[in-house]
Image: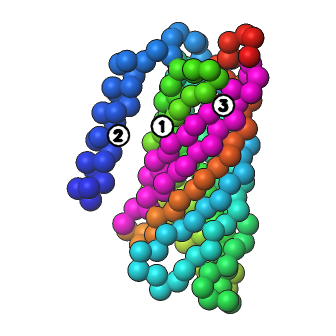
Amino acid sequence: MKHKQTSQLILFALLISASAVSFAGRQGVSFFYGIGLGAAYIDESAPALEFDAAASGEFTVGLEEDGWAVEYSGYQTIETGTSLSTLDYKLKGSSASLSYRTVESGGNYYKIKYGNADTDVSWSNGATTTKVNGNVYGLAMGFRLEKEKRMEIEYDFFSADSASGFADTHMVTLRYLFGGTPGRTGL
């Protein structure tokens, strides 16, 4: 638990520091939304059960101002196998997060995020759905495609709370976003 609190404190300090030296400028409040495709992998450190990577899809909405954004994402994976041939699983959940996007340079930018996620793990054998809560930490690189269209490749680490007894999950998503702070004209 102490490691978790320390990492949250360090992340918070980094976000505040990034804000203090921000060059994002006064861009105003804007709304964005997008869709994404990716993969999720459940990481078992002492595997009694090994999970296959699962293809996923997501929908994201958010509000951003001066580089800061509040994002909400809903995601779901397809049913995927495990090391037991008779047991498959599927993830479905949502996350709410605070993110910071750096100023664009040459149409590229970086983003860090921190938030909370709730995930339901459904099992093919009819067992009760497992509900997992935890924190999500993310890093992304974005590319401006047009004035109000962007593409991001994002890595998220979902750290399940210890009470759930569930393993951590890694997610990689390619996201296409519409709206948000417009890029410079001439892109």
Q: Nearer the viewer, mark 3 or mark 1?
A: 3
Region of the chain picked out in magenta, as a range: 135-162
Q: Are marks 2 and 1 in contact (CB under 8 Å)?
A: yes
Relative depth, front residue between 117 and 14: 14
Q: Secondary structure at mark 3?
A: strand
Structural crowding at the residue carrying mark 1, measured as other residues with C-alpha within 10 Å and reported as few (<14), some (14–19) or many (≥20): many
State if disc 2 and disc 3 touch (CB < 8 Å): no
Q: CA distance from mark 2 to mark 1?
A: 9 Å
Q: Position of residue 54 (x, y in %)?
A: 67, 66
Left or right of 148 on screen, residue 153: left
Magenta stretch holds residue 47: no
Q: Which residue is mark 2?
A: 11
**Majority secondary structure of the magenta segment?**
strand
Residue carrying label 1: 112
Q: Position of residue 95 (x, y in %)?
A: 56, 48
From this view, report whether residue 74 is shown above or below residue 143. below
For the point 76% across and 23% down, the residue is 146
Secondary structure of the residue carrying tag 2 is: helix
| 147 in the magenta segment | yes
Mark 1 is on which residue type? Ile
x and y percentages locating residue 3 in the rendered image: 26, 55
